[in-house]
Amino acid sequence: MNWPVDRPFAGSEPARNRGAPVGLDVQPALRFAAACRMRDTHMIRSILVSAVAGMTLAACALAPHEADDASPINPGNMSETARVLSSDAFQGRAPGTEGETKTVAYLIERFTDLGLEPGGRNGSWTDPVTLTHSQVTDVRALNVRQGETVIDMEQARDIEISSANPRETITVRDAPVVFVGFGVSAPERNWDDFGDIDLHGKVALFLVNDPDFGVAEDDPVSGVFGGRRMTYYGRWAYKFEEAARRGAVAALVIHETKAAGYGWNVASSSPGENYAVTGKGAAAAHVDLQGWLQEDMAKQWVASAGYDLDALRTAARKRDFKAFALGDLRFNADLSLSVETSESQNVIGKITGTTHPDETIMLSAHWDAYGIGAPDAEGRVVRPGANDDALGIAGIMEIARTLKAGPPPERTVVFAAWTGEESGLLGSEAYAQDPIYPLEKTVANFTLDILQTAGPARDVIQVGEGQSDLEERMAAAAAKQGRTVSPEGLPENGLFYRADHFSLARRGVPVLLIMGIAGGSDLVDGGREAGDAWVADYIAHRYHNQYDAWDPDWDLRGAAQDVELFLDMTRDLANSTDWPQLKATSEFRDLREASAASRQ
């Protein structure tokens, strides 16, 4: 099927196989949509109807099967779906833009033609997501004071600070600063950094990553938090949430390049900007101010209070460490912010189960990309997101097509296309805050987010480890394909906590993620070396920019293998009464156990 293609942006259709990095504006695309965000919901729906009208999708027009005929997953179908979604007509699929309108219409049309039922509320295909975008516009005061010593700070140079609370003015006066070490409260690991400290009205100062990051093998803390593999406790998102739960007014994480996984230039790349979900269920509380503190500035803070940062880091790696106030160090801020809201849409379809329709298996990917950016060296402005994540959307559509061609499942299978992933997993988070299908009855979530395009592989890359027995099920399914499971290549980067499946995982749902950049596959043609080269090339030259474009020379046989893996696991779970279990090493096991009675 060939969708109508609007006149493309001049010079924006990327050429294939270009290797040089490009200059780009990587600000999330909602900034571009500021003028479009307040459009009336009824107007959007009218546009959707108009956009769908006259569009036809003929299955016979899709590309022929290009893989082993024994596989039910058609790489040609996947390629065609990715080609359409990443074309200039969709303008980079930024939430809140005309690109979203066309994308949502296309997804509804495809889900309908695949034979899915509407999976939203009240028979709808969509589930609205209200997003808040805030930006610090004026810094009248930003400093810390210790006695007569005042240390002034400059946004982006010394600190990156923003707010997820929709207020136009935020003022913090003389808030005590508390050093909380790594800020971990992990009963399952017998670790508590907080002790009896009261954080209400105070600033929590955190170290980045986990207590065992980078320690020697003979250190007593080695392996307590997974060694190289980052846990949720190492993520800045957890640290901000823990500070909010304990009543802190602000939370700052001391930036270290190696422990964070990226430099200060990345941490400070969007100074004062924040996105959040609003108006959905039991939303998490936020501190008034959150962000990163540059390491040299952090050293000045603690030195003014009579401490040494390296010594504090060593102390914080001991099990008996407890948070304490940094002398009489006081934090001050007086900021103005602009606040905007917009409405976007998750698109949801389903196949209703015949025997246990209230029990669900979910397959998901995100439809959004980075929209329109600054022109690159060749004048192109569309960031098409062909692999990230049009190809993931194509994968769940292939699973839907295959399941619909067979007997109906006993359990309900849900297909979710999320919005707002690139702005912070916002669409999936909105769903998880106010789920359509109860999370305690969600059997599993399978998420596709970037698939490798370099051909068949002897293995599948596992993202995360020690979370649930879905890991063993994946190994068994891979073995049926003649493949093995390999661990991710850079576990310290915490990819398990950085994709949409995590919005459900953190609420206790068993999940699996396939993400092509998690590590190089052992490719049939070229082995691990070729797989690592593909990952390195994609990250360096295509990730989040104009070069993430559809390529007719993609070899999607390996991607189809991974999609088929999720198909097989979905089919098995959808026709059983099994409930995958979280492991004792999962940070979220207690949450799942709390709802165990509902699954009896």
Image (spheres, rainbow, N blue to C red):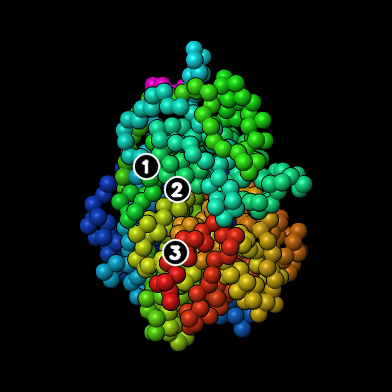
Of the two numbered discs 2 and 3 in the rendering, the one whose residue sits closer to the viewer: 3
Rounded to the nearest angstrom, the CA distance separating label 2 from label 3 is 31 Å
Q: Nearer the viewer, residue 487 or 103?
A: 487
Residue furthest to the bottom in view is 407
Q: Amino acid at mark 1?
A: His
Q: Residue at x 35, y 70 (%)?
A: 119
Residue 541 in magenta?
Answer: no
Image spot of residue 4 (x, y percent): 39, 63
Q: Is residue 235 visible?
A: no
Quadrant showing the N terminus: bottom left
Identity of the amino acid at label 2? Ser
State whether the magenta stretch is mostly helix, strand or loop. Answer: strand
Q: Which mark is residue 594?
A: 3
Q: Amino acid at mark 3?
A: Ala
Q: Earlier in the sequence, mark 1 or mark 3?
A: 1
Residue tagged by mark 2? Answer: 423
Please tell me which residue is depicted at 45% across the width and 45% down the height of the picture: 241
What secondary structure is marked by label 2?
helix
Q: Secondary structure at mark 3?
A: helix
- The boundaries of the magenta stretch are 139-143
Q: Residue at x 35, y 75 (%)?
A: 117
On the rendered structure, is 405 left or right of 54? right
Q: Residue 266, image x and y in percent?
A: 56, 38
Q: CA distance from mark 1 to mark 3?
A: 34 Å
- Sequence-wise, which precedes: disc 2 or disc 3? 2
Query: How crowded is the residue under tag 1: few (<14 C-alpha within 10 Å), some, or many (20+)?
Result: many
Q: Position of residue 366 (x, y in %)?
A: 46, 59
Task: Describe the element under mark 1 as helix, strand or loop.
Answer: strand
Q: Earlier in the sequence, mark 2 or mark 1?
A: 1
Asked if one can make out residue 244 in the rendered structure from this viewpoint, the answer is yes
Residue located beneath label 1 in the image: 133
